[in-house]
Image: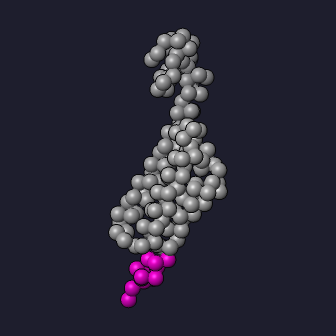
Amino acid sequence: MNSFFHSDTFHIIAQILIGSVWVFHGLYSKILNGIPRHRLIVGKILGAANAGLATKAIGLLEVLLGIWAFTGWQPVDCAGVQSAAIVAMNTLGMWHRLRGARIIAYLTVGHTRGGDNHGYYIPPPIGVESLQGRAW
């Protein structure tokens, strides 16, 4: 006797729920700008000038991913693409936040190799010049 979690009913419910999340966030949150925070996050990473179009493109891809989940076609591949999309989006968001934190740490804790920073050395972030104007 099969359990409910191995039944076709469970798999169909899972497909509908997972696909709905992707379609909601792709269509409502990004394409229709229903949650403006998504566009703002994209703007912080890609620049405000690119935020509108990039957010809509991401939204379209999310809608397509939701439709793929609805179909149940190649479910393992679909789950892999969903996982990769989530990891990529979260990695970009975290990279952006950590880069900002590193800039703050660089400016507040130490910016030289000398002893005036209490023994701490934090290398400057990529693209940031030293306070002396010398590129690192």
Q: Nearer the viewer, residue 123 or 135?
A: 135
Q: Is 105 in front, or is 87? A: 87
* Residue 35 pos. (x, y %): 64, 54
Name the one closer to the observer, 102 or 80: 80
* The stretch drawn in magenta includes residue 107: no
Q: Is residue 84 above or below residue 125?
A: below
- Is 7 located above or below residue 77 in the figure? below
Q: Position of residue 113 (x, y in %)?
A: 48, 14
Determine whether, in the image, residue 21 is placed left or right of residue 1: right
Q: Residue at x 48, y 24 (%)?
A: 127
Q: Position of residue 87 (x, y in %)?
A: 45, 51
Q: Is residue 105 visible?
A: yes
Residue extending furthest toward the bottom: 1
> Which quadrant of the figure has residue 32?
bottom right
Depicted 45 relative to depicted 132: above or below: below
**Residue 59: percent from left, percent from top:** 52, 55
Most prominent secondary structure in the magenta stretch?
Answer: helix
The answer to if 2 sits in the magenta stretch is yes
Q: Is residue 8 above or below residue 134?
A: below
Q: Quadrant of the N terminus?
A: bottom left
Residue at horizontal 56%, vertical 33%?
Answer: 100
Q: Which residues are magenta?
A: 1-13
On the question of residue 45 being in view, the answer is no
Query: According to the image, what is the colour scheme of the structure?
Result: one colour
User: Which quadrant of the rendered structure holds the C terminus?
Assistant: top left
